[in-house]
C-alpha cells in the first residue's frame, strides 16, 4: 500500500480540480479568453501558484508531481492558443470578407494586330518550307542598296526617303526594306535558299493615315536550279488563299524594282466586297498587296551566287497593309498610338 502524505494528496486533488476547471471553462469571445488567461496562465493564476507549491514537495515525489503540473500547464496553454487563433480568424473574416461583394475581373492582355498577322504570314510560309531570317535595322549602303542593284542616282537613296545615321564613306542608315537581310543570307549560304525576313523598316515619310515613317515587312526569297515565274505565281496564290480565304484570286501587273527582272505588283481580289466593287478597292474589285519578281542576275552575282546555274524569285509585302485588309483598319497611325480601345479589340476570347 502506498502512503501519501496529506500535502501530496491535496496537491494531486488540486491539480485534478484545476484540470476540470480548465476543461470546463467556456471561451466564446475575447473577454472570457482574457479571463481564462488571468485565471489559469497569468502570473497570479492558479497553475503558477501550484508551481510555487512544488518547492515544498519531497524530492522523491517531485518528478511525478512536476509532470502532472506540466501537463496541466500545457493543457491550459493549448486551449488558450487554439481559442485565440479561432477568435482571431473569425473576427478577421467578419471584418474583411464580404461574401456579397461582386467578383473582380482581371484584364487579359492581347497580341498587337501586327504581331498576329506577322505570325500568321510566317506560319503560312513555314508550311511550304520557308525559314525565318533576321538582320540588323541599321544597315550599310551595300546591303540596303548597292548589292540590290540600286544605281547610284536612284531616288530611294535620297535623304527624302532614307534616314541616314552617317553619311560619307561609312554610310549607315535605317534599313528601308528587309531585302537587306536577304543579301546577308545569300552572302552566307549557297542555294537552295528558301527564306522569309520579317522586320521593321524605316522611310522618311510624313505621317498620315496612309503613310508612316516606320512599318513592317515580310520579304521572301527562293533560289535554286530552275526556279521559274510560274513557281512565284503559284506560291503567291497559295499565300493569298491561306491568308484571305480559298476564294481569293490574284492578278499580276508589270512593275519595276532594281533587284528583280521581270518585276510585278500583285493584287488580291477585294475581300471586303467579294470583288464586286466598294470604297476600299475603289470600285476596281482588286487590292494591291505586294511587289515581286525574278531575282536580277546582278543581285545573285553581287552576293556570290552563280547566276548561270541558279535562278530565284523574291517578293515583299507590308504587314500593315495585310492587317488593314484582314481587320479593316483604315488608319496606319492606330498601330503605333497604343490606344487600348483599338488594341483591346484583338483580345483573344478565353
Ligand atoms: N523591297 C521591296 C520594297 O521594299 C519589295 C520587293 C521585294 C519587291 C522583293 C520585289 C521583290 O518595296
Image: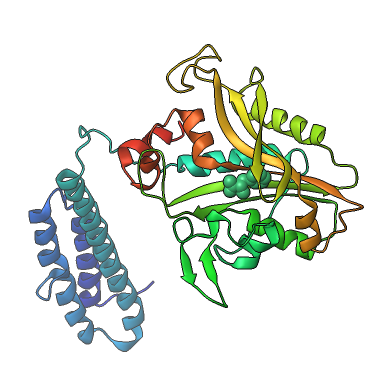
Which residue is drawn at the image coordinates 30% and 76% (left, top)?
65
Nearest to the observer: residue 64 or residue 235: 235
Residue 158 position within the rendered picture, expressed as x and y whole percent measured from the top left: 50, 59
Residue 224 position within the rendered picture, expressed as x and y whole percent measured from the top left: 86, 48
Q: Is residue 176 left or right of residue 143?
A: left
Q: Quadrant of the N terminus?
A: bottom left
Q: How does the figure colour the protein chain or chains?
A: rainbow
Q: Quadrant of residue 344?
A: top left
Q: Quadrant of residue 298?
A: bottom right
Q: Please tell me whether residue 198 is drawn above or below residue 174 in the rendered image.
A: above
Q: Quadrant of residue 333?
A: top left
Q: Is residue 270 visible?
A: no
Q: Is residue 291 left or right of residue 336?
A: right
Residue 48 position within the rendered picture, expressed as x and y whole percent measured from the top left: 17, 75
Which residue is drawn at the image coordinates 53% and 76% (left, top)?
168
Which residue is drawn at the image coordinates 17% and 81% (left, top)?
52
Q: Is residue 167 visible?
A: yes
Which residue is drawn at the image coordinates 16% and 44% (left, top)?
94
Q: How many marks?
A: 0
Amino acid at each position: 500500500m502506498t502512503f501519501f502524505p496529506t500535502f501530496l494528496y491535496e496537491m494531486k486533488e488540486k491539480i485534478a480540480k484545476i484540470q476540470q476547471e480548465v476543461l470546463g471553462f467556456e471561451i466564446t469571445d475575447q473577454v472570457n479568453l482574457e479571463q481564462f488567461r488571468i485565471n489559469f496562465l497569468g502570473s497570479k493564476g492558479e497553475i503558477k501558484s501550484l508551481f510555487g507549491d512544488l518547492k515544498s514537495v519531497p524530492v522523491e515525489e517531485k518528478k511525478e508531481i512536476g509532470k502532472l503540473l506540466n501537463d496541466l500547464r500545457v493543457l491550459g496553454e493549448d486551449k488558450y492558443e487554439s481559442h485565440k487563433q479561432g477568435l482571431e480568424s473569425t473576427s478577421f473574416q467578419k471584418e474583411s470578407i464580404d461574401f456579397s461583394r461582386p467578383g473582380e475581373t482581371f484584364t487579359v492582355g492581347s497580341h498587337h494586330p501586327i504581331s498576329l498577322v506577322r505570325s500568321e504570314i510566317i506560319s503560312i510560309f513555314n508550311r511550304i518550307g520557308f525559314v525565318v531570317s533576321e538582320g540588323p535595322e541599321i544597315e550599310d549602303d551595300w546591303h540596303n542598296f548597292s548589292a540590290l542593284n540600286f544605281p547610284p542616282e536612284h531616288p530611294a537613296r535620297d535623304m527624302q526617303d532614307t534616314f541616314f545615321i552617317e553619311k560619307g564613306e561609312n554610310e549607315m542608315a535605317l534599313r528601308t526594306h528587309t531585302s537587306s537581310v536577304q543579301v546577308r543570307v545569300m552572302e552566307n549560304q549557297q542555294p537552295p535558299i528558301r527564306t522569309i525576313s520579317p522586320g521593321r523598316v524605316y522611310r522618311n515619310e510624313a505621317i498620315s493615315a496612309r503613310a508612316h515613317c516606320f512599318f513592317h515587312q515580310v520579304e521572301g526569297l527562293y533560289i535554286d536550279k530552275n526556279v521559274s515565274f510560274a513557281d512565284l505565281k503559284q506560291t503567291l496564290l497559295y499565300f493569298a488563299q491561306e491568308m484571305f480565304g480559298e476564294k481569293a484570286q490574284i492578278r499580276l501587273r508589270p512593275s519595276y524594282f532594281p533587284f528583280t527582272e521581270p518585276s510585278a505588283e500583285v493584287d488580291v481580289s477585294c475581300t471586303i466586297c467579294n470583288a464586286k466593287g466598294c470604297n476600299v478597292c475603289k470600285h476596281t474589285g482588286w487590292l494591291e498587296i505586294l511587289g515581286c519578281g525574278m531575282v536580277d542576275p546582278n543581285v545573285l552575282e553581287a552576293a556570290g551566287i552563280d547566276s548561270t546555274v541558279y535562278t530565284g524569285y523574291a517578293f515583299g509585302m507590308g504587314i500593315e497593309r495585310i492587317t488593314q485588309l484582314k481587320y479593316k483598319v483604315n488608319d496606319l497611325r492606330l498601330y503605333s498610338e497604343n490606344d487600348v480601345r483599338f488594341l483591346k479589340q484583338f483580345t483573344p476570347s478565353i
